[in-house]
Image: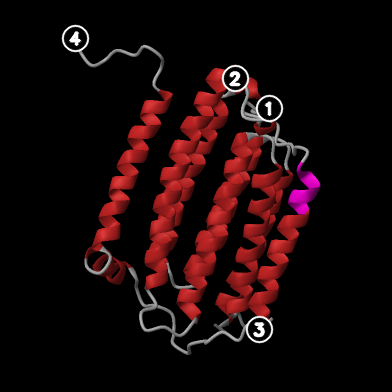
Amino acid sequence: MDSVDLEHFLVIGAILFGIGLYMSLAKRNFVGVLIGIELMFNGVNLTFISFSRFVESAEPLNGHIFVIFVITVAAAEAAVALALAVLLYRLRDTINVDQIDLLKW
Amino acid sequence: MEDTGTVVAFWILAALTVGAALSVAAVRNLIHSVVLLIVSFAGVAGLYITLSADFIAVVQILIYIGAIAILLIFAIVLTPRAGRLNQEGFMLLPALALAVLVAGTMIFVAFDTSWAISERDGFEETATAIGDLLLDKYALPFEIASVLLLSAIIGAILLVRPEGAEEGPE
């Protein structure tokens, strides 16, 4: 408990990823699913940054670059996904993912 | 990292982040859920600072709290009749089992692997080096990312444009 090592950060990243995975699979509301995906992104980014800080590497900053690209893609994904949510709401009056079963036979 | 300040900051931020993330999944109102998500994002930004990733911490606050959380709130308030309940569907138990399994596996691997730990100190300041890398070694991915953002913006506008919108000024 008197020093903070790589494993501590990896555990927090894993817990965030687990909570995000649970939410994205279990939630009924589409926005809840998106919140889960954002939590998973955060867990992965935290893991990248902690490896970048602690692990032996010739170019340790590459982890930071990777995180910047992950955040960029996450922002693009959030914008398109929320546009889809609004569109779905206009068409079906609901954004509960278990009621959107047009492709289910 | 052994100095007392870092250790205390780590444990406070870790409790804040994980506690807020658990509450995000547990609270019943989606608006409250997004507010707690903001707390969790801020906790992760603090953890980045303890990892001496100053630039990423600022980017985290700007983009996750400033853009993505606000977008989520917009999505909730733009869909009023869909309800704001943050409840689970029929996948509750399988999802819980899978999430516990995946997180448990990752925690086991984190402790089981002998990582090549480096003895160097934290970064002094990362923004200059990141800027150099982005415009030199990673210039092509950087440009592709800008094209991706542009196409995402155009796609989002195209999707939510009302039916029969005016085709430009007359």
Q: Name the residue under label 2.
A: A92
Region rendered in magenta: B91-96
Name the spot of residue B4 as percent of width and height, x first.
Answer: 59, 80
For the residues bearing labels 2 and 1, Cβ distance under 8 angstroms: yes
Is residue B66 in the magenta section? no
Q: Distance between the residues labelled 2 and 1?
A: 9 Å
Q: Mark 1 points at which residue?
A: A99
Front position among marks 4 and 2: 2
Q: From the viewer's perspective, is residue B87 above or below residue B170?
A: below
Which image quarter is the C terminus of chain A in?
A: top right
Residue B16 visible in the current orientation: no
For the residues bearing labels 3 and 1, Cβ distance under 8 angstroms: no
Q: Is the magenta stretch mostly helix, strand or loop?
A: helix
Q: Name the residue under label 4.
A: B170
Q: What residue type is labelled 4?
A: Glu
Name the spot of residue B32 as percent of width and height, x first.
Answer: 65, 39
